[in-house]
Image: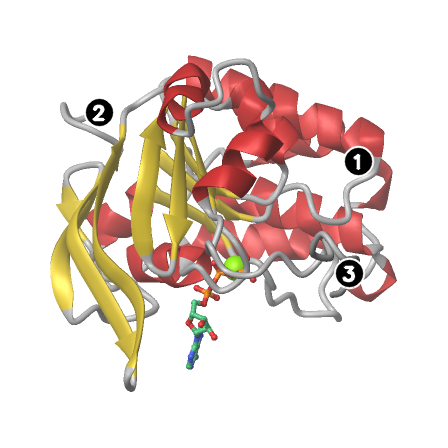
């Protein structure tokens, strides 16, 4: 492995027409670090992840994955990156195993089978590996996609909403896997709405709001920033992302909305 962070983002800006989806974003994810990327709907998290994965071209900024610039066709870049999109595409008429075999070919891997078996067993998917993907449930698809993203042993794992649709046991398995990967030196950059996941696993948390990183650090640091030393991550998140506009859920003193 190279020295330096698993991911570095410097001065990233991305627009959709006139909308500034990500504004001058800078952050890094160290090797072995779990970084939880939080933010309200529409904050720009998915846009950031897609840009890191090389699927969107930013207006400004420098991104490096495992020290390599984002060049979707470059082998060094692709080898360093594992990416799980929020809505992954799968060929319904392949079996899970064929899907993994396809990815292994794309990455030119040899000896990937034992890694695949190991990850499938972890996710209790072994018995399903020769079934067509069209028969997989949502959570099974998610676990297959994560398995595929890890086959080539990336240095950075990007996951957009890892816990959506996972049953409690699978969610627990996923957490255990993330910790194991971090222990192996992989950097994890997780976009999530699961504050439990962030509070439990993340070494650092970043909060994106209207495309800007408004807070970053360990949980105690965020509590300090929100001036709420004893509060939960939910309270801290709500305080930091407060629009300072009318609170739609509470009437005024006369009970009017
Ligand atoms: N392809 C697109 N064309 C135009 N606008 C887009 C496009 N994709 C995203 N946006 C806009 O960019 C902003 C950021 O969207 P993004 O999907 O990155 O947010 P997010 O933080 O991932 O939200 P969520 O928590 O809902 O997943 C939003 O205002 C969204 O409407
Ligand atoms: Mg998103």
Quarter of image, res 66: top left
Return the x and y of residue 29 as percentages of the image width and height.
29, 31
Q: Residue at x 55, y 44 (%)?
A: 192
Q: Residue at x 59, y 19 (%)?
A: 200
**Marks 1, 2: nearer the viewer:** 2
Give the CA separation, mark 3 to mark 2.
Answer: 34 Å
Q: Which residue is mark 2?
A: 1
**Front-lying residue, 206 or 144:** 206
Return the x and y of residue 231 as percentages of the image width and height.
57, 20
The mark that comes first in sequence, 1 or 3, is: 1
Quarter of image, res 35: top left
Return the x and y of residue 40 as percentages of the image width and height.
52, 54
**Front-lying residue, 218 or 248:** 248
Specify whether 239 is left or right of 76: right
Specify whether 184 is left or right of 179: left
**Front-lying residue, 66 or 233:** 233
Query: What label does residue 126 carry, if any?
Result: 1
Return the x and y of residue 123 as percentages of the image width and height.
74, 32
**Front-lying residue, 219 or 134:** 219
Query: What label does residue 133 carry, if any?
Result: 3
Quarter of the picture holding the C terminus: bottom right
């Amino acid at each position: 492995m190279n020295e330096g962070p698993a991911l570095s983002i410097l001065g990233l800006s991305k627009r959709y027409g006139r909308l500034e989806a990500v504004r001058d974003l800078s952050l890094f994810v160290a090797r072995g670090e779990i970084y939880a990327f939080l933010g309200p709907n529409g904050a720009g998290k998915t846009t950031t992840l897609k840009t890191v994965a090389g699927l969107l071209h930013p207006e400004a900024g420098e991104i490096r994955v495992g020290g390599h610039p984002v060049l979707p066709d470059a082998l060094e870049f692709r080898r360093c990156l594992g990416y799980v999109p929020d809505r992954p595409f799968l060929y319904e008429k392949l079996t899970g195993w064929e899907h993994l075999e396809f990815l292994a070919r794309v990455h030119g891997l040899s000896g990937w089978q034992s890694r695949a078996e190991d990850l499938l067993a972890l996710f209790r998917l072994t018995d399903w590996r020769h079934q067509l993907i069209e028969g997989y449930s949502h959570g099974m698809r998610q676990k297959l996609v994560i398995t595929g993203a890890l086959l080539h042993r990336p240095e950075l794992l990007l996951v957009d909403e890892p816990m959506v649709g996972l049953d409690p046991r699978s969610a627990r398995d996923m957490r255990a896997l993330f910790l194991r990967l971090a222990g192996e030196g992989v950097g994890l950059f997780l976009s999530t709405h699961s504050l439990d996941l962030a509070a439990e696993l993340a070494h650092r948390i970043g909060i994106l709001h209207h495309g800007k990183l408004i807070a970053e650090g360990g949980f105690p640091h965020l509590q300090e920033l929100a001036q709420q030393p004893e509060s939960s991550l939910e309270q801290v998140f709500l305080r930091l992302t407060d629009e300072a506009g009318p609170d739609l859920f509470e009437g005024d003193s006369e009970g009017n909305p």
